[in-house]
Amino acid sequence: MVFHPYPDAHYCSKVCGSLCCKVSDVFVLKGEDVSYEYWSSNHPAVGRTSCGCLDEEGLCRIHEDSRPLVCRLYPYFRYQNAIMASLGCPYVREVVLPRLGSHHARDAFFKKVMDYISWEGSDSEFRQIEDRLRECKGIFLFIRGNAD
Ligand code: SF4
Ligand code: SF4
């Protein structure tokens, strides 16, 4: 069955409730160029319970702009030529994982996500992300596939 590895805006805002923009540790990598709006909206503020770039509809105001790389990649990260899929994301748990039962489906999924991830980030950025993932307390599923 054909499905998209990433959730769409409706799923994120209405089904999930923009969870990862409320609870995750959104970090910016060394040397990463994020938008002025991200910086200005995310100065330390007492009582903030979500990213300052989240709008009233539960959508990211800078989605098309330069949001942090982790936001563009989440819920998947590259880790030693495999994919770490975050089990904190309901789309991964409820939509993606039930469809990865066959080798064919898993390999197609793996190739699609790896192509996207590799296009978005550089090797030095992935090394920084791997360091953060080693310290992260989140739960991830390690997915390997045949990239060919
Ligand atoms: S946790 Fe997953 S489904 Fe929810 S907003 Fe983030 S990416 Fe979208
Ligand atoms: S920058 Fe956008 S995608 Fe990233 S945490 Fe903030 S609202 Fe969410």
Image (cartoon, grey):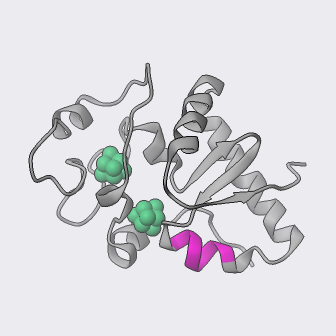
Residue at the image point whose x is 60% and y is 37% from the top:
130
Q: Main secondary structure of the magenta part?
A: helix
In-image side of 96 versus 66 (left or right): right
Please tell me whether residue 128 belongs to the stretch shown in magenta.
Answer: no
Q: Quadrant of residue 110?
A: bottom right
Asked if residue 135 is positioned above or below residue 110 in the image, the reply reads: above
For the magenta stretch, what is the residue range? 91-97
Residue at the image point whose x is 89% and y is 53% from the top:
146
Asked if residue 36 is positioned above or below residue 110 in the image, the reply reads: above
Task: Report the quarter where the N terminus lies.
Answer: bottom right
Where is residue 85 shown, x and y percent of the image? 61, 59
Where is residue 143 shown, x and y percent of the image? 74, 58
Residue at the image point whose x is 90% and y is 48% from the top:
148
Where is residue 70 shown, x and y percent of the image? 47, 43
Residue lying at the far top of the rendered structure: 31
Please tell me whether residue 94 belongs to the stretch shown in magenta.
Answer: yes
Residue at the image point whose x is 68% and y is 43% from the top:
79
Where is residue 94 shown, x and y percent of the image? 57, 79
In-image side of 147 versus 19 (left or right): right
Q: Quadrant of residue 102?
A: bottom right
